[in-house]
Image (cartoon, grey):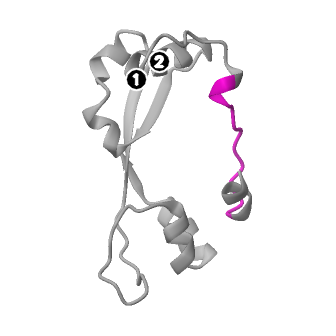
Amino acid sequence: MKISEYLQIDTKFIYSSDIKKNNGLRAQDKVIDICMRLNADKYINSIGGKELYDKEIFKNKDIELNFLKPALHEYKQFENEFIPYLSIIDVMMFNSKDDIKTMLDEYELL
């Protein structure tokens, strides 16, 4: 929430622990259950989720599943070789607020 505030990103946060859900479910099934309880028709996951989630299973529940693939921007990380996709904290350590906002706007939905 602090990062969103700092970057002036207006979004609503919902804690999973505040949602009545079937806690016996795991992984993809739990995500689908939460989406259904929130009447969501779209779910966007990071690109790493391509190995975990199946678009067809979501589609069968009338939920569009997309994966967020950020554009890769290399930036200086001290004197080290650039290591991509570490975290937003790493990005914030080495980039201006304006540069970060630009980076966040550059992505592809798969």
Tell me the residue that label 2 is attached to: 30
Magenta-drawn stretch contains 14: yes
Residue at 37% over, 17% down: 58
Q: Quadrant of the C terminus?
A: top left
Q: Amino acid at mark 1?
A: Ala
Secondary structure, magenta segment, majority class = loop
Q: Position of residue 101 (x, y in %)?
A: 57, 66
Q: How many marks?
A: 2
Q: Does residue 110 appear anywhere in the picture?
A: no
Q: Position of residue 23 (x, y in %)?
A: 54, 13
Secondary structure found at label 2: helix
Tell me the residue that label 1 is attached to: 27
Answer whether labels 2 and 1 touch (C-beta < 8 Å).
yes
Q: Is residue 103 above or below residue 81?
A: above
Q: Determine the CA span between mark 2 and mark 1.
A: 5 Å
- In the image as oriented, which residue stretches furthest toward the bottom? 79
Residue at 44% over, 60% down: 106
Task: Give the magenta part as a residue range.
Answer: 7-17
Secondary structure found at label 1: helix
The picture quadrant where one finds residue 53 is top left
Q: Position of residue 54 (x, y in %)?
A: 28, 23
Residue at 72% over, 64% down: 6
- Along the line of sight, which residue is nearer the eye, 72 or 49? 49
Q: Is residue 93 above or below residue 55?
A: below
Q: Amino acid at mark 2?
A: Lys
Q: Position of residue 77 (x, y in %)?
A: 42, 81
The picture quadrant where one finds residue 20 is top right
Magenta-drawn stretch contains 63: no
Q: Dot 1: few (<14), some (14–19), or many (≥20) neighbours within 10 Å?
A: few
